[in-house]
Image (cartoon, grey):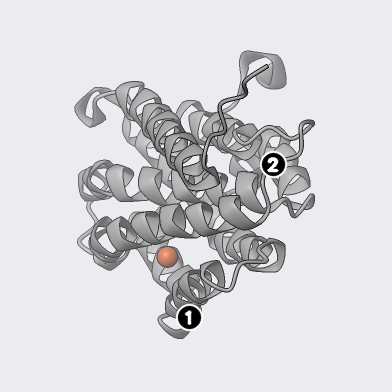
Amino acid sequence: MHTLAVAPDLLNESTLAATKTRIEQAIDNVMGSLPKPEELSSEERRGMISRYTSVLEGNFIYWMTAAYLSVRSEDARPIIIDNLLEEVRDSHPAMLRRFAIAADALPTKEDARAVNDELTRARLFFGKLSAVPTLAAMAFFEGFIQRFMAYLADLAVARGSSDLEYTDVHGICDIAHTEGLIQALSAEMALSPLRPDENVYEGVDQLEALVNRIVSGQSNAAAA
Ligand SMILES: [Fe+2]
């Protein structure tokens, strides 16, 4: 029997391309589901800004830290460190809080409760510290954030805010961050391929569900 051997590099390249496509599709799905800002009430605009703030302010750095702890590749680490350095040094959580306050959209306990189930599932996923799915999830998150910023800024402006530092900064820097995470993913795939029981898109799916919850608010079941 003749077996056709596939070079590991080639295998990774096609897997990487498929992963990128799947991440981009997930981002397109979320962006395509956004209601038009002008069709939302002021309270609906507030809710979306508040739920976004409730999730991102306290979790983004924690999840990027999970990515740092999960990777083994020496090529992936500096990319994640650069990302974390920028978050901490420029205090992105403080920037996001200013953005929410200026739009009179500081999260309430109802906002925290609305995203709680999806947020908890995402946290448990990151706790697995599985490198490739974690990097795929963070590439999705960075890519989504970058695409979402113009929309988020429109919501804030419609609420009378003029503090757009957070959306301005993230609409630009996250393009490089997304590319960096895809590079890190590539390096990590070569070093620690997925086990058969692992799903590379597990975290992408969890974060897509979380972002959908940020957009839609409390589920009917939870509100009943
Ligand atoms: Fe940030």
Disc 1 secondary structure class: helix
Q: Ligand 1 quadrant? A: bottom left
**On the image, numbered disc 2 is attached to which residue?**
194
Residue furthest front as drawn: 1
Under mark 1, the amino acid is Leu
Question: Looking at the image, which residue is at 50% across and 76% down?
Answer: 78
How many residues crowd around disc 1 within 10 Å: few (fewer than 14), some, or many (20 or more)? few
Disc 2 secondary structure class: loop
Under mark 2, the amino acid is Leu
Quadrant of the snapshot with the C terminus: top right
Query: Image height check: is 158 above or below 127?
Result: above
Q: Is residue 107 visible?
A: no
Residue 85 position within the rendered picture, expressed as x and y whole percent measured from the top left: 48, 80
In the displayed structure image, the side of residue 153 where residue 29 appears, left or right: right
**On the image, numbered disc 1 is attached to which residue?**
85
Question: Looking at the image, which residue is at 40% across and 62% down?
Answer: 101
Question: Looking at the image, which residue is at 22% across and 52% down?
Answer: 160
Quadrant of the snapshot with the N terminus: top right
